[in-house]
């Protein structure tokens, strides 16, 4: 019956039933039939997914349905809403790393369903987390840490807003210290040492893009009735799609759109770097296990280390190239037999090809890194250059601002300081800053000369005019001019 209702194979339906039974543990026939209905609804909602993903989704849907007190359609719509605001587009990764952890995020931090989904989604967007594991862990950890430090405040979102209204507590959260109503100081928060630290700080600032994005994501959820409509809309699109592939693309469209709308540069670069790390592992011929280890190492080091995502990829490349460049040596086993310890000459040649691939990738990555750091520095300088351009535009209109010299001196000081600060990150940003500043200063110098000349001409013309109340003295005629005219 389940296969007939869903159009799936009996084996897929049986796996979905088993997953739901394991998740909720039905105690009677009525609960068992309800669990089977949940599995069938998941199969109808996600016809494009493989059996393993269906199994994950069935268990996750049953869990969220029970924890948040929802029916099947509400739970499915809630999960779709969560993916809409998430950076995680792959359904399997979303099911295991995000949707399956939303109830834990809610419970650990006293968030409701919408708040838990919005928090994990916002952090995944800002962290560029395509897999969802590290951003969900950051949301879970942050919620628990705020609950521990502000237990007198009843909900997670109220604690977050309390932190926004009390910026003096941010230092205590990040570096360790006392909180209101607590006897002993707390150690530095775990999330304060992760790659999500800047985004957590932004969440504590209600004027920041991250905080506003979070509030927008919370509002986008609506309520249970909206979730039910969301599930119905998605199912309608899936059923209307001409093929399974089109259905999958339509389902992921909203999440993909979020990626295009991402305004956080650091998050975008983290996503790009993660993709580079995965592609490099494949291009260098690593096994599936080695690729997985490399990916896990990337996630851990960029989440809890101090380096940037780009630095981590370069580090992995250097380690792999070092291993590929090792030569084997011919040794005797003591019984007159020779063998190579390490790569044989043939394997060494193969390794050199892999090393060459990685070297090219490293050079390209360093170029990306340089351009990225340069763009960050130039973005910091943009307000300063904006002030100078305002002076330039005023001069072009024939008016010199009163504080031109002061504005130029202050701008020059700021630009030179930025140039010095950029030396460790970018080799060319400092030169570009000085060049732009010099060009603007020279342009302003030329414009000031023009304005002074024009002002002087106006002054001279003013002097030649008759004073008010006097009769102008007629000039004697120019005799030579008259003679020329007669001739």
Image (cartoon, rainbow, N blue to C red):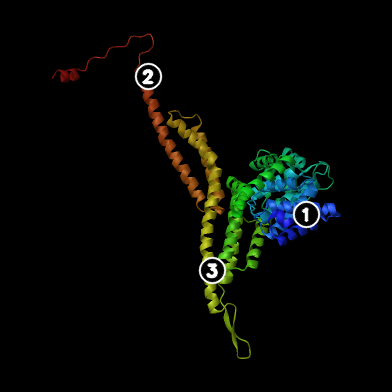
Q: Residue at x 46, y 46 (%)?
A: 435
SS of the residue at dot 2?
helix
* Sequence-first tag of 2 and 3: 3
Camera-nearest label, 1 or 2: 1
Q: Which mark is residue 134?
A: none
Q: Residue under label 2, please give it.
A: 462
Camera-nearest label, 2 or 3: 3
Q: Residue at x 59, y 71 (%)?
A: 323
* Sequence-first tag of 1 and 2: 1
SS of the residue at dot 3?
helix
Per the model, the C-alpha gap separating discs 1 and 2 is: 96 Å
Closer to us: 292 or 14: 14
Q: Give the percent coordinates (x, y) of residue 2.
A: 74, 56
Per the model, the C-alpha gap separating discs 2 and 3 is: 78 Å
Q: Residue at x 54, y 51 (%)?
A: 372
Q: Give the percent coordinates (x, y) of residue 23.
A: 79, 56
For label 2, count other residues whose C-alpha is less than 10 Å away and answer few (under 14), some (14-19) or many (20+): few
Q: Residue under label 3, please give it.
A: 355
Q: Residue under label 1, please give it.
A: 36
Q: Give the percent coordinates (x, y) of residue 468.
A: 39, 11
Q: Is residue 444 above or below residue 190?
A: above
Q: Is residue 302 left or right of residue 34?
A: left
Q: Are marks 3 and 1 in contact (CB under 8 Å)?
A: no
Q: Is residue 455 left or right of residue 68?
A: left
Residue placed farthest to the bottom in the image?
336
């Amino acid at each position: 019956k389940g296969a007939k209702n869903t159009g799936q194979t009996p084996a897929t339906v049986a796996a979905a039933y088993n997953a739901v039974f394991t998740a909720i543990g039905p105690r009677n026939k009525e609960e068992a039939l309800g669990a089977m209905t949940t599995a069938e609804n998941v199969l109808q909602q996600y016809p494009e997914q493989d059996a393993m993903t269906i199994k994950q989704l069935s268990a996750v849907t049953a869990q969220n349905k029970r924890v948040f007190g929802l029916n099947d359609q509400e739970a499915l719509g809630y999960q779709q809403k969560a993916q809409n605001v998430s950076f995680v587009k792959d359904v399997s990764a979303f099911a295991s790393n995000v949707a399956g952890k939303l109830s834990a995020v809610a419970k650990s931090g006293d968030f409701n369903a919408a708040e838990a989904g919005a928090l994990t989604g916002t952090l995944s967007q800002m962290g560029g987390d395509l897999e969802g594991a590290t951003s969900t862990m950051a949301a879970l950890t942050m919620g628990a840490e705020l609950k521990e430090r502000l237990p007198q405040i009843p909900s997670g979102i109220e604690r977050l807003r309390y932190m926004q209204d009390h910026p003096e507590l941010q230092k205590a959260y990040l570096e360790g210290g006392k909180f209101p109503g607590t006897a002993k100081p707390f150690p530095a928060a775990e999330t304060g040492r992760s790659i999500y630290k800047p985004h957590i700080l932004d969440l504590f600032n209600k004027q920041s893009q991250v905080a506003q994005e979070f509030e927008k994501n919370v509002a986008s959820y609506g309520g249970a009735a909206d979730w039910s409509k969301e599930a119905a809309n998605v199912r309608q699109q899936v059923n209307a799609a001409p093929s399974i592939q089109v259905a999958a693309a339509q389902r992921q469209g909203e999440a993909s759109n979020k990626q295009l709308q991402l305004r956080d540069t650091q998050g975008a670069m983290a996503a790009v770097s993660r993709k580079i790390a995965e592609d490099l592992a494949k291009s260098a011929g690593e096994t599936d296990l080695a690729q997985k280890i490399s990916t896990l190492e990337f996630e851990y080091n960029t989440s809890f280390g101090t380096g940037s995502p780009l630095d981590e990829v370069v580090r992995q490349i250097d380690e792999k190239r070092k291993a590929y460049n090792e030569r084997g040596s011919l040794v005797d086993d003591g019984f007159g037999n020779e063998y190579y310890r390490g790569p044989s000459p043939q394997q060494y040649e193969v390794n050199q090809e892999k090393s060459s691939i990685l070297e090219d990738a490293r050079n390209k990555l360093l170029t990306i890194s340089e351009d990225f750091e340069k763009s960050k520095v130039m973005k910091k300088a943009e307000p300063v250059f904006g002030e100078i351009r305002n002076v330039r535009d005023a001069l072009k209109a024939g008016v010199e601002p009163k504080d031109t010299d002061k504005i130029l001196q202050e701008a020059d000081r700021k630009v030179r300081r930025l140039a010095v600060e950029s030396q460790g990150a970018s080799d060319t940003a400092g030169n570009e800053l000085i060049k732009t500043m010099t060009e603007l200063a020279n342009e302003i110098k030329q414009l000031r000369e023009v304005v002074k000349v024009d002002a002087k001409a106006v002054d001279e013309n003013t002097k030649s005019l008759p004073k008010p109340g006097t009769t102008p003295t007629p000039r004697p005629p120019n005799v030579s001019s008259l003679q020329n005219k007669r001739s």
